Image (cartoon, grey):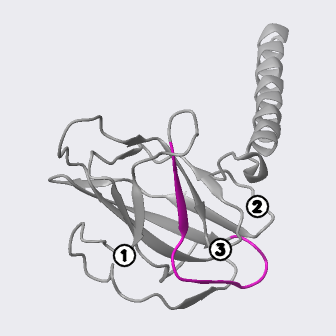
Amino acid sequence: MPRSVYDTVLVTVVGLLVGAVIWTVTAVAYDDPAAGRSTSGPICPEEGIRVTAGPVNPALGLRAMDLTLENCGTRAYRVEGYPEIRLLDRDQQGVTGVTVVHGSGGIATVTGFDDPPGPVTLAPGETASAGLLWRNTATGPGGSAAVPYLTVAARSGSLPLLLTPDGGLDLGTTGRLGVGPWRTTGGTR
């Protein structure tokens, strides 16, 4: 191989390796739930759980989104009830004028959404899900509530994890967000 081609290949490989190391260090340094950052990366937070937001399912003004709770730790993790949700604006300040309710709260009739919660125990690698439900309906003057961020605590006292749902939550002016209980999914990651 001529020297110039060898040098080009060597520089390219070294550049890729350095880039991979920088990317990995950046992910570890900035993917810190204690600092209020997303936990969507490959690391597992100290509590041993990770929460992710699924895509928003829009249908004629009715919106739904699943939250997935993954036990990425090394021991069983137990939840019972509903995730604790806090809605945040673009400055990551609390959104006012929106009530978060357990169950559908009259938003719509959705099978299972109003079923009573029960205990859910996740072995390492297992997942559970909970749904969010809202309407993007403008019912009067005032601006629609746009929610680009939310924090989710899997259970009372858990570290709230910051999520950035794709497209955010477009809550309209109805001022209600329904939260379903945690349910096992039967799946693993």
Residue at mark 3 to residue at mark 1: CA–CA distance: 17 Å
- N-terminal label among 1 and 2: 2
- Image point 36% across, 42% down: which residue? 145
Residue 122 position in % (x across, y down): 63, 84
Residue identifier under label 3: 156
Element carrying mark 3? loop
Q: Nearer the viewer, residue 116 or 182?
A: 116
Residue 103, which numbered label?
Answer: 1
Please identify, in this view, whether the residue under mark 1 or under mark 2 is nearer the observer: 1
Could you classify mark 3 by the number of other residues whose Cα lies within 10 Å: few (under 14), some (14-19), or many (20 or more)?
few
Q: Which element carries disc 1, helix, strand or loop?
A: loop
Residue at screen point 53% across, 61% down: 85
Residue visible at 27% across and 35% down in the picture: 142
The answer to whether one can see residue 167 in this image is no
Q: Is residue 54 above or below residue 158?
A: above
Residue picked out by circle 2: 45
In the picture, residue 69 is in which quadrant?
A: bottom right
- Mark nearer the N terminus (2 vs 3): 2
